[in-house]
Image: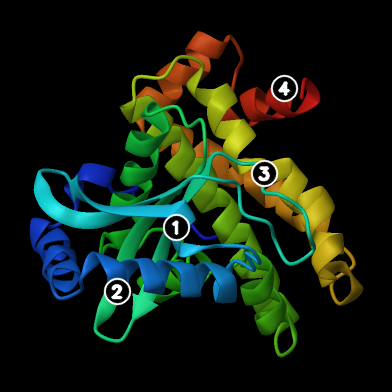
Amino acid sequence: MYKSLPVPYTWDSIDKSILQKSANLIKNFSLKAIKEVVIEKCKKNLEFSSIWSHNVLVVKHALLGVDDAAIIARFKKYPKTENDDFLQITGMARLFQVENGILPVVLLFPDIDETFLDHECIHLCQWLNNQSYLLTMSERIALFQQKIEVVIKSVLRTNPEEALDLLFRLTCYKVWIELEAYYSGNTQYVIQHAHSSSRPFEMFSDVIPIFGIDRYIPDAKDRCMNEFIEFCNELESQVEWVRNSVIDYGVNSLHEALWRCNKYM
């Protein structure tokens, strides 16, 4: 399942022409039309059950100096989900596929810390980059457009091994992008914040049985746990600031640092 990888690309290495393409796509929509797309996608892909147009403010936003390359949707109220729960998160970045391209969007909920916006914009640049690292572009679009559970269970129906591989690669990818986004934002306690956002051990111990992968692959959790060590060791050897973050944390490896974060949650 785990394969040695090239050094991960950096979030700001994205070709500016990709961001300009997003800006051109956005220019072809009115803000009213964009708001309608965002509401429709949130209901369909994210299972938000209560969104009203007057409760959402949509504005254009720059990415890496390219004007109007992304959309920010600010919610005046926390939306409910289809299971009648209110979302408990501050916001999220998403890639919404539309007829002529990909709409990069950050959803912001009430009482947001504005530094969160910068963090999510880094994620948009990570996802839009046409280089592949752990996830292909098509996989990123699928996974970061809708609920992850929908994508994994769709693959699980036809190929359990492929579903497990996708979940494992997604988990490793989330660890990397959260480390980079927090580090690039000059955030203290990079590893702790990255762990709380990616929760790799929870993905393996809880999500695998929730999604039903272990019914097809009984040793799925153990395989992921063991191979995650390899990923952490490789990432640490490839990226100097990751090694330095591990040293600052006072442990011997990235895996140990993340595991300690998990124990103290």
How far apart, in angstroms, are the residues tagged by discs 1 and 4? Answer: 44 Å
Q: Which residue is mark 4?
A: 260
Mark 4 is surrounded, within 10 Å at the Cα level, by few (under 14), some (14 to 19) or many (20 or more) other residues, namely: some
Q: Quadrant of residue 187?
A: top left
Name which residue type carries label 2.
Ala
Q: Which residue is mark 3?
A: 200
How far apart, in angstroms, are the residues tagged by discs 4 and 2? Answer: 46 Å
Of badges 1 and 3, the one in the foreground is 1
Q: Secondary structure at mark 3?
A: helix
Residue drawn at point x = 44 percent, y = 57 percent: 54
How far apart, in angstroms, are the residues tagged by discs 2 and 1? Answer: 14 Å
How far apart, in angstroms, are the residues tagged by discs 1 and 3? Answer: 37 Å
Percent across and percent down for residue 225 are 74, 47
Residue 122 visible in the current orientation: yes
| Side of 156 relative to 230 (left or right) | right
Which mark is on residue 33? 2
Q: Secondary structure at mark 1?
A: helix
* Furthest residue in direction front, as rendered: 54
Q: Is residue 116 above or below residue 144?
A: above
Q: Which residue is mark 1?
A: 54
| Side of 250 relative to 103 (left or right) | right
Q: Earlier in the sequence, mark 2 or mark 1?
A: 2
| Side of 107 relative to 147 (left or right) | left
